[in-house]
Amino acid sequence: MNESEFLQGYDPAAYDRPSLTVDLVLLGISQGAPAVLLLRRDDHPFAGCAALPGGFVGMDEELDQAAGRVLADKAGLFGDQVHLEQLYTFGAVNRDPRMRIISIAWLALLDEAAFAAALAGNPALIPAKVEMQGDAAAVTTPDGDVLPLAFDHAQIIALAITRLRGKLDYSDVGFALLPEHFTLRALQNVHEAILGVTLNKPAFRRRMLDKGWLVATGLREQNTSYRPAELFRFSNPISS
Amino acid sequence: MNESEFLQGYDPAAYDRPSLTVDLVLLGISQGAPAVLLLRRDDHPFAGCAALPGGFVGMDEELDQAAGRVLADKAGLFGDQVHLEQLYTFGAVNRDPRMRIISIAWLALLDEAAFAAALAGNPALIPAKVEMQGDAAAVTTPDGDVLPLAFDHAQIIALAITRLRGKLDYSDVGFALLPEHFTLRALQNVHEAILGVTLNKPAFRRRMLDKGWLVATGLREQNTSYRPAELFRFSNPISS
DNA sequence: CGAATAGTGTCTGTTAGACACTATTAA
DNA sequence: TTAATAGTGTCTAACAGACACTATTCG
């Protein structure tokens, strides 16, 4: 760091600075497919388009706290119910036509209850099914209408899915999309929804059980039409 | 985005904003281990510590351009010689005691020639061997002295290694650390240095050749003491 | 009992690790 | 010829996909 940069560091008025925001991909599983919660924009730019919930980062606020605050403000959810992880920072000069805004994108994984609670708590949230189309994601309303996305949010959502696909098999993120007790079939459904493929049942069961992450509870599903499946819970062997 | 946030967006003077920088992990392989290029800090804070080369992001500068500019200014290298990828954004409130600075960390992979060219071009650069110590990285000079690292740069370097380890097997990043023509033994050496383990030779060769990324050139090493190995080059089957 | 899903046994093909072997070059 | 490394053949163990089978529960 040279002298001018050092001075710039001490004099906040010396140079313009970009604005810094966080944008959240609120991701759940709905009807066998990944789904996100979006907000409809009323104002220019991208009026009428759907956008990720976001907000500016406060000067004395940690980045993950900013993400947690947006989660609480826009979805009524709290950090201990939701897996939050930083995705990537988007900062193209013209990504927002108004001004330079750098956005740190975060991935929030919601289980079915959290997804429903967010929808119930904030009626402005729009649930939308995500479909991967190469580099970008397309989202559709439950009615099947394609929702245009604001800014670079199609890329951000696509990156969220891609990241999740990559981590699903070797990390424990998949469990963040499930309640505390779940059946192996429900776990497989989550994996299939994220990956967009159907998986082999015996192989999937073996692989999951061999990882040592699953604890059999001895409990069974309730109110099923047919043979109820055993309920498992997730247990982190060496908390990572 | 509510009204006050919208106004904030239009009035750069309305709120303080964090400063935004890029920091670069200039990573190569040296003597069978990952090595980074660092700069010694002369001033407070962390005077005497080693730090990653970095710089502020210009208001009209793309993020990858800012990283490329730092690469050119601090190491005399250009983007087409070096694999550059965004790592993570670090923004803890107190990571810099002077003021709030959010830093977007980038990973730059240098082959042996680029590593040497950077060292020759900027005598201030210090090559340092990286050792992973759990969550953080420790760096030592060629003489074996431990170099204290400024700010959160030990974490940033550790994340760079961790990321590289994760991607090494399924992506083509490994080739960014090699010249255009290389032997399979050199490729294996790179993998072993990054992963910090020794690998089985026949299995490694099979795996690499089966990926379809390697093209035999028919050329052979020159000036070896013993049997010269065949030179391969990397060819991206479906440019990713 | 029939329907439907839970859960398992087993075969097969692929792949990684281990290890010994052959091949090639320079001195 | 010897030293040293390049490169290969082959055995074995681990594991995933496929598919058929048994088990359990509800109505």
Image (cartoon, coloured by chain):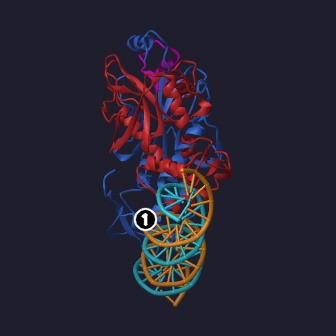
Chain colours: A red, B blue, C cyan, D orange
The image shows residue D17 at horizontal and vertical percentages of 44, 64
Asked which quadrant contains residue B208, the reply is bottom left
The image shows residue D25 at horizontal and vertical percentages of 61, 54
Label 1: how many Cα within 10 Å (few below 14, some 14–19, many 20+): some
Residue A19 magenta-drawn? yes
Instruction: Answer whether residue B121 is visible to the viewer in this image.
Output: no
The image shows residue B40 at horizontal and vertical percentages of 56, 35
The image shows residue D20 at horizontal and vertical percentages of 47, 72
The three-letter amino acid code for the residue at tag 1 is Met
Q: Nearer the viewer, residue D26 or A125?
A: D26
Instruction: Answer whether residue A188 is visible to the viewer in this image.
Output: yes
Label 1: chain letter = B
The relative height of residue A214 versus residue A26 in the rendered view (above or below) is below
Task: Return the residue at label 1.
Answer: B208
Q: Nearer the viewer, residue A75 or B113?
A: A75
Q: Nearer the viewer, residue A36 or C16?
A: A36
The relative height of residue A144 versus residue A213 in the rendered view (above or below) is above
What residue is shown at x 35% (from left), y 43% (from top)? A132
The relative height of residue A188 versus residue B123 in the rendered view (above or below) is below
What residue is shown at x 48% (from left), y 38% (from top)? A28
Q: Which residues are magenta?
A: A1-22
Residue A35 magenta-drawn? no
